[in-house]
Amino acid sequence: MAAAVAAAPGALGALHAGGARLVAACSARLCPGLRLPSSLAGLRVGPAIWAQGWVPAAGGPAPKRGYSSEMKTEDELRVRHLEEENRGIVVLGINRAYGKNALSKNLIKMLSKAVDALKSDKKVRTIIIRSEVPGIFCAANLPVPTIAAIDGLALGGGLELALACDIRVAASSAKMGLVETKLAIIPGGGGTQRLPRAIGMSLAKELIFSARVLDGQEAKAVGLISHVLEQNQEGDAAYRKALDLAREFLPQGPVAMRVAKLAINQGMEVDLVTGLAIEEACYAQTIPTKDRLEGLLAFKEKRPPRYKGE
């Protein structure tokens, strides 16, 4: 997300001239000492663009990003590191009740700061993004699994945030859609790129062209979300399911989880032969780790492994 927020709209012209190199993305540090080899240089993929809401800047034609009205508060984003049996799970709670969780400059800044901190925290295993405003959902370029818990409305930018996550779960009563064409604009926070990748080009076009809003059951039927739950009295059914999934991820090797995510994300952008080469390079990064040896020893001794992310 931090990279998307910082992307300059002027880069659009450069993108038409040529794509960015895959090696730049693959070389991003997963944890100290882990990089993909330079042998994968030369592969091309298109980088993400953050273009929604660009409006003419005063005094010249150069565009700038338009945001919702400002009303700063220190509690717009709440970062909670869970403890005890949930240690390693971090919850990012968006809390702009007065703005219905609309993205503000302050919220974007806080999200970017949180993402930067979590990227380098080896103790973080899974991140859940949820709304702390009842009925509204509004992770990110993070190396660990991210889960979007949608318990209410996720329209426009809210759905785009959810699409940036690895896994999406929602209550049956939730409402989701990219509705920007109703306002004579288009999704610009990744929606035109991530929605087709999630549900297919034809259906994504239909939903964007019509600005259609789906409930949880409809979203599950088209593959937009992985799980749909009946809403509970507390209004947090999706969050509870996300927490269950995060607990399933906790016992796995942290380095393996990060490398697996990288292999999947980068492999989906290229042909199968190149994807297999990326997988092989990522697999090689797990071989010299202490965690791999610990996994083998724990299996032999028939005990739970004690991974340290090394």
Image: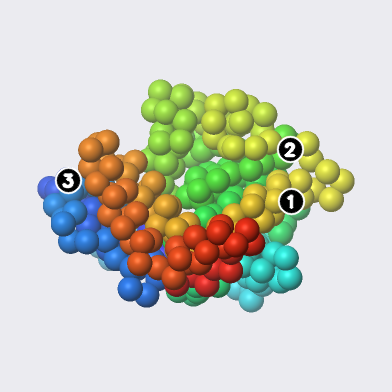
Query: Disc 3 to disc 1, how far (Cα)?
Result: 43 Å
Packing grade of label 3 (10 A; few <14, some 14-19, many >=20) is few
Disc on the earlier residue, 1 or 2: 2
- Amino acid at circle 2: Leu
User: Is 126 left, or right, of 241 in this rendering?
Assistant: left
In this view of the protein, which residue sits in the foreground, 142 or 276? Answer: 276
Few, some or many residues within 10 Å of mark 1 (<14, 14–19, 20+): some
Residue displayed at 67% across by 41% down: 170
The answer to whether the residue labelled 1 contacts the one labelled 2, judged by CB atoms less than 8 Å apart, is yes
Front residue of this view, candidates 221 and 301: 301
Query: Could you say which disc has been placed on residue 16 in the image?
Result: 3
Local SS, label 3:
helix
Q: Quadrant of residue 78?
A: bottom right
The disc label shown at residue 96, or none: none
Mark sitting earlier along the chain (3/1): 3
- Residue 224 visible? The answer is yes
Q: Position of residue 186 (x, y in %)?
A: 41, 40
Q: Residue at x 78, y 36 (%)?
A: 230
Work out whether mark 3 precedes mark 2 in sequence or the reverse, and give the earlier one.
Answer: 3
> Residue placed at 14% from the left, 52% from the top?
42
Q: Nearer the viewer, residue 249 or 132?
A: 249
**What residue is pinned by disc 1?**
240
Q: Residue furthest front?
A: 300
- Residue picked out by circle 2: 229
Residue 97 in the figure: left or right of residue 2: right
Q: In which quadrant is the N terminus drawn? A: bottom left
**Mark 3 vs mark 2, CA separation in Å:** 42 Å
Amino acid carrying label 3: it is: His
| Up-down relation of residue 40 to residue 196 (above or below) | below
Report x, y in % for residue 246.
63, 55
Residue 79 appears at what percent x and percent y? 63, 70
